[in-house]
């Protein structure tokens, strides 16, 4: 490389943001994802045995998907080809695959094809990859923030090993920040920045497991300090990062996972966790009416007759949410969520209806007993409809021993909690009294 070319390369490298410059050069420098990359773990074993086939890297931004793809290419001595699914079509894909075939045929050189945002490929574009992935012409690494089991075609997923990336831990991000501060070749070492522990911990916390976001905020702070100061303190760190954008895909995993966490926290009687998941969804822009509907369902499914007021509270919260909207409806939703979370729990009515529906779908349909049939139309008496029916209100107790189903079957079994404990006592008394009357 000539001196002029070297200068150009240096300028291009320096123009990159800190997160891009600090990408790991070896597997030893890579931070995070030890659940599949640590010693003895699956991806590490695949690399050591040189048996890497096609893989899908799935997880949130800033967790190292692109960096690890480049490291894998270097480790396997493969030619690295990179595409972004948002900006290429079938023609570009075929061109890359043709080059890969030529390399393999001419000198046995393997190609690692990294496709970022793979979920953005259409079904047709994904299908184009299948033959060469299956035959081993290319080793595919697809990166996606969307659940591949929903966003990718089944044949591609079945031919790939899926590795789920986790958000970086606080200590892992702190390690990245401290490395960047001391690295004189690619990082900020030449700037002699002295960052306080408080500032670094703030950046590690506020970045929500996104290493890229933390590093870029660190660079802004380090390069924007005034009056010749070299101390990056908490105030500088706070001014160097935008208001936290809550990572949340309203139509994908984030939506369903957070909703699931909210429902299970209410069911599990944890008001603090319930409030947290409610807050996360609201802050991310979730439709409050969706949340209100889920609370209504939980009030019946998980509380039921153990506290019938829970459903009244939930329905009132839904109606009030429709009336007032955000931001005030957050207060109403919080009241309903905490009520449902702290109410005694029973799913007895839910279990009962599902058991009855299952019988109707899979067993013989029961005829209505004659004494329960409508007796108000002409001719009903001649058919014997209504004959022998006993009117419950004519009894002093408001209850009579009478067959209402035609078979012995119990669907509703109240639990011994909350108001349903009273229902249980009442039903046991009635059921034990059957057959006592003459």
Image (tube, rainbow, N blue to C red):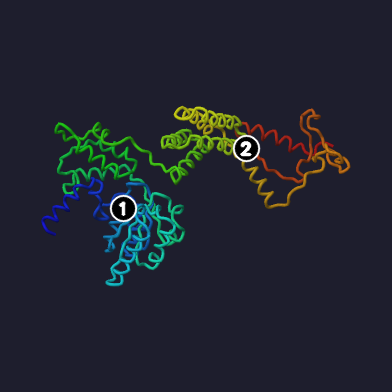
Q: Nearer the viewer, residue 122 or 178?
A: 122
Up the image or down, 414 lies above or below 22; here it is above
**SS of the residue under disc 1:** helix
Q: Residue at x 37, y 50 (%)?
A: 165
Q: Residue furthest bottom?
A: 106
N-terminal of the pair, mark 2 or mark 1, is: 1
Tag 2 residue: 415
Is 34 on the left or on the right of 227, as rendered?
A: right
Is 405 on the left or on the right of 307, as rendered?
A: right
The answer to whether residue 333 of the structure is visible from this angle is yes
From the top left corner, tell me how far across and down residue 135 is, in percent. 39, 68
Q: Nearer the viewer, residue 407 or 289?
A: 289
From the top left corner, tell me how far across and down residue 169 is, in percent. 33, 44
In the picture, the quarter occupied by the C terminus is top right
From the top left corner, tell me how far across and down residue 225 is, in percent. 19, 34
Is 265 on the left or on the right of 120, as rendered?
A: right
In the picture, the quarter occupied by the N terminus is bottom left
Quadrant for residue 126, please give it: bottom left
Mark number displayed over residue 66: 1
Is 277 on the left or on the right of 418, as rendered?
A: left
> Would you call the spot at circle 2 few (<14 residues within 10 Å), some (14-19), or many (20 or more)?
some
> Would you call the spot at circle 1 few (<14 residues within 10 Å), some (14-19), or many (20 or more)?
many
From the top left corner, tell me how far across and down residue 83 is, in percent. 32, 56
Mark number displayed over residue 312: none
**SS of the residue under disc 2:** loop
Q: Nearer the viewer, residue 123 or 420?
A: 123
């Amino acid at each position: 490389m000539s001196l002029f070319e070297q200068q150009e390369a240096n300028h291009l490298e320096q123009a990159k943001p800190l997160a891009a410059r600090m990408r790991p050069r070896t597997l030893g420098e890579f931070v995070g994802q030890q659940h599949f990359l640590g010693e003895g773990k699956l991806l590490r074993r695949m690399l050591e045995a040189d048996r890497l086939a096609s893989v899908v890297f799935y997880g949130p931004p800033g967790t190292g998907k692109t960096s690890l793809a480049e490291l894998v290419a270097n480790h396997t001595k493969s030619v690295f080809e990179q595409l972004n699914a948002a900006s290429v079509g079938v023609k570009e894909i075929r061109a890359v695959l043709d080059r890969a075939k030529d390399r393999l045929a001419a000198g046995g050189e393997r190609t690692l094809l990294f496709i970022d945002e793979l979920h953005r490929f259409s079904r047709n574009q994904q299908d184009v990859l299948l033959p060469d992935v299956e035959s081993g012409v290319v080793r595919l690494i697809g990166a996606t923030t969307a659940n591949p089991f929903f966003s990718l075609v089944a044949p591609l997923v079945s031919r790939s090993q899926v590795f789920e990336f986790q958000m970086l831990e606080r200590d892992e991000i702190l390690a990245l920040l401290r490395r960047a501060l001391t690295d004189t070749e690619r990082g900020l070492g030449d700037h002699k920045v002295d960052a306080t522990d408080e500032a670094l911990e703030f950046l590690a916390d506020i970045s929500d497991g996104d290493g890229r976001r933390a590093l870029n905020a660190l660079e802004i702070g380090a390069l924007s300090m005034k009056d010749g100061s070299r101390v990056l303190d908490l105030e500088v760190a706070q001014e160097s990062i935008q208001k936290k954008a809550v990572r949340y895909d309203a139509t994908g995993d984030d939506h369903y996972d957070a909703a699931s966490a909210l429902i299970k926290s209410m069911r599990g009687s944890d008001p603090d966790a319930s409030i947290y998941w409610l807050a996360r969804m609201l802050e991310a822009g979730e439709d409050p009416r969706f949340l209100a509907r889920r609370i209504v369902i939980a009030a019946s499914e998980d509380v039921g007759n153990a506290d019938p007021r829970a459903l009244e509270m939930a329905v009132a919260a839904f109606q009030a949410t429709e009336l007032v909207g955000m931001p005030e409806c957050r207060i109403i939703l919080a009241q309903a969520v905490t009520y449902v979370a702290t109410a005694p729990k029973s799913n007895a009515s839910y279990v009962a209806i599902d058991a009855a529906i299952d019988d109707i779908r899979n067993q013989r349909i029961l005829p209505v007993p004659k004494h329960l049939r409508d007796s108000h139309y002409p001719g009903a008496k001649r058919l014997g409809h209504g004959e022998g029916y006993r009117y419950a209100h004519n009894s002093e107790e408001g209850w009579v021993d009478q067959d209402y189903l035609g078979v012995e079957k119990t669907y509703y079994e109240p639990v011994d909690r909350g108001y349903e404990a009273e229902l249980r006592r009442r039903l046991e008394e009635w059921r034990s009294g059957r057959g006592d009357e003459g």
